[in-house]
Structure formats: structure tokens, C-alpha cells
Image (cartoon, grey):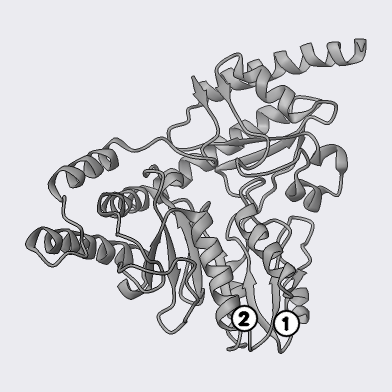
Amino acid sequence: MIYLDYAATTPVNEEVLNTFYKVTKDYIGNPNSLHKLGLKSKEIIEAATKQIANLLHVKESEIIYTSGASESNNTAIKGICLKYKNRGKHIITTKLEHSSVTAPLSYLQAQGYEVDFVKLDEYGRVDLDNLRSLIRDDTILVSIASVNSEVGVIQPIEEIAKILKDYPKLYFHSDITQALGKININLQDVDLASFSAQKIYGIKGIGCLIKKESIKIEPLIHGGKSTTIYRSGTPAVSLIVSLAKAIRLIEEKKKENYTYLLELNTYLKERLATINDIHINSNKYCSPYILNFSIPFLKSETMLHALEQDDIFISTQTACSTGSKSTAVYEITKQEKYANSTIRVSMSHLTTKEELDIFIKKLTENIERLKIFSESH
């Protein structure tokens, strides 16, 4: 099997799985209970929270555990907008956001909120001058992902944060799911940041929302004591501790992995560039972990299933996307033919050149076969 869909989800690191198993076996008490088993569970959660805070350079009190990035994004967006609706109902975002950002924004639009989309340059990066021009007195939230999950565009988050710092009545949220453990991210001036364990070789079902200590939000879930007043429910001890382990392991190897992925990405891009029917959508401002390209005469799903027959697994868009057209690719290329025929290859430190060679070989064979079939019909 050749797995090239790491941006959708990653296999669980065995060390993380072992941590999850050990904590599940040894810490059976509800951390909200007052007896010693409960206190024992509470202590290990506090130790894990301290570790995460140190790794991400945030305060322990700023960590909110969730079920994943989708819940974190919803909590951040709805939480800010509902809490500060008396200040205004204007939101700024981009057309490159994940569906767990666009969906709650659509929900809020139906409640009377106004959403503006900032212009992007030819590489898909935020036009900073346009961003400034969109900010109004009633703007309460700007939500821009650090790394786009389809094409891999890396946004200038620190520059954006510095601009927004001059507007104390609005808050800056960033989905850092595709950035954590891959590229350097500075959360100093980011008010809220979302991520998930499943993208960093952790276990599905746990995520995080980093929220600056001074900011209040309206919770999505009410009732029941937890690690924070902003997300009720019995704390998932094993998941929380395994999340801390996953972050530590991926952060330790981040620099080494990034160098390796740059090499892999360059190698794959050079190989793809030799195939006439391929248009590469990712550019120099994209994460090396993601390489997006199009085969204009072919439907994305057709190639996905053709490669699946060879036990090669890629993606067409993000795993949570609906519809066949890639909004992200269209926003960057302005070409329907590219947006309707996207292939996303997402790699990791586990990917090898040998796997990419096999992928290229099978991709080329399938392009030739499907092109002949297409022309004959």
C-alpha cells in the first residue's frame, strides 16, 4: 500500500498508542471526582496540559480540549460572535478555508452576520492592503487558516496578526491544523488557534482550541464540570495525555522532517512536470507536505479510483469537502478546468522516493489509458 493522503488523517504513532493504552489502564478515575482515583487522573491531565503549553508557548489556562479541529473552529467562531454580538456582526475570512470554518460562518450569516472575503494574490496569499480596507468599526472576527488543506498555501499569519493588533475590538482566529508540527508558527498575536490530533499521528477524537486568557467566548456545550468553563463534559484523560505525547514527538522532529519533505516535494514536482497532461496548482508559497495538481481532461474521482486499484491512496480535495469543484484551486488559478480535476498528494516523513516513483509510474499509465478511453468516447 502507498498512502499519500496524510493531510486527511495520519496513522497513529505507536508510542502515542502505547501512552493511550497505559493511561486507559492505569487512570480509571473521573478527573472530576474528589476521591484519590479522580485526583490521580486530574494530576496527569494537568501535567499533559503543562507540557502542551510549554511546547506551543501558550499558558495552561489558554488550552481548551475538544473532539477535534471542527469543534475547535466552531467553538472559536460561534463563541466569539455570540459573545461579542453587541460590538458588531462583521466577519472577515478567505475563500480558502476548511468547511468547518465556512459552515459556521454560513450559519452566522443566516443569523444576520455579514461576511467579507479578503482578496488573494496570484499565489493565494492574503492581500494585506485589502485586509486593512475591509476592517470596519463593527468587525469582531477575522478567521484565516495558517495553511490551506487543499493546495497548501501558507499565509503570512504573523504579518496578519500584527495588522489586527491595532484593532482591539476584533479577534483573530487561525486554523493551524495543517501547520502544527510541520512549519514554524508563532501564536503570540493570534487570539484563537484550532488543531486536531489526527493530523499529527495522534488518536482521532481529540483536538484543541487555544484561546487567549483575556478573551471570553460563549460555549457550544453547557453543563458538567470539565478542565475549562468553555467546554463541558468529562475530560478524556487518555486522549488528552496521548495528544501531549503526539505534539511532543512531532515537534521534536519538525525541522528534520521539513527538510526531508522539501526534498520529496521538489522531487515529485520535477517528475510531474515531465507529464504533458498535468498542471501543478501548488506554488512556492505552499507547504512541502502538500502538492496539488490537475489533469484537465479527467474527473478527479476517476483517477482516485483508478489508483486505488493499484493500492495507491490520494485525495481529490479535503476529506470534508462537498461537491467536485475545488474552491481553493479556482481561487488561485481562476480556471474551471483545473478546479474540476484536482488531485491532492499529501506526504509525510514516512513517505519514500520509491513510493513516489511507483505513484508516478501508475499515474502515467492511468493517464494514458484513460485518455485513450476518453478520446474514443
Q: How many labels were placed on the picture?
A: 2
Q: Are marks 1 and 2 in contact (CB under 8 Å)?
A: yes
Query: Which residue corresponds to mark 2?
Result: 164
Residue located 92% across and 12% down the image: 377
User: For the residues carrying marks 1 and 2, which lies nearer the camera in this image?
Assistant: 1
Q: Is residue 351 above or below residue 160?
A: above
Amino acid carrying label 2: it is Leu
Horizontal and vertical percent for residue 261? 51, 40
Instruction: Give the crowd class for mark 1: few <14, some 14-19, many >=20 residues within 10 Å.
Output: some
Can you tell which quarter of the image residue 163 is in? bottom right
Q: Is residue 336 left or right of residue 101?
A: right
Can you tell which quarter of the image residue 10 is in? top left
Amino acid carrying label 1: it is Ile
Q: Is residue 293 left or right of residue 48?
A: right
Can you tell which quarter of the image residue 101 is in? bottom right
Query: Which residue corresponds to mark 1?
Result: 135
Residue located 47% across and 68% down the image: 186
Q: CA distance from mark 1 to mark 2?
A: 9 Å
Q: Label for residue 113?
A: none
Horizontal and vertical percent for residue 57? 36, 70
Horizontal and vertical percent for residue 300? 74, 30
Judge by depth and name the residue closer to the eye, 176 or 360: 176
Q: Is residue 19 above or below residue 285?
A: above
Residue located 73% across and 50% down the image: 328
Judge by depth and name the residue closer to the eye, 213 or 86: 86
Q: Secondary structure at mark 2?
A: helix
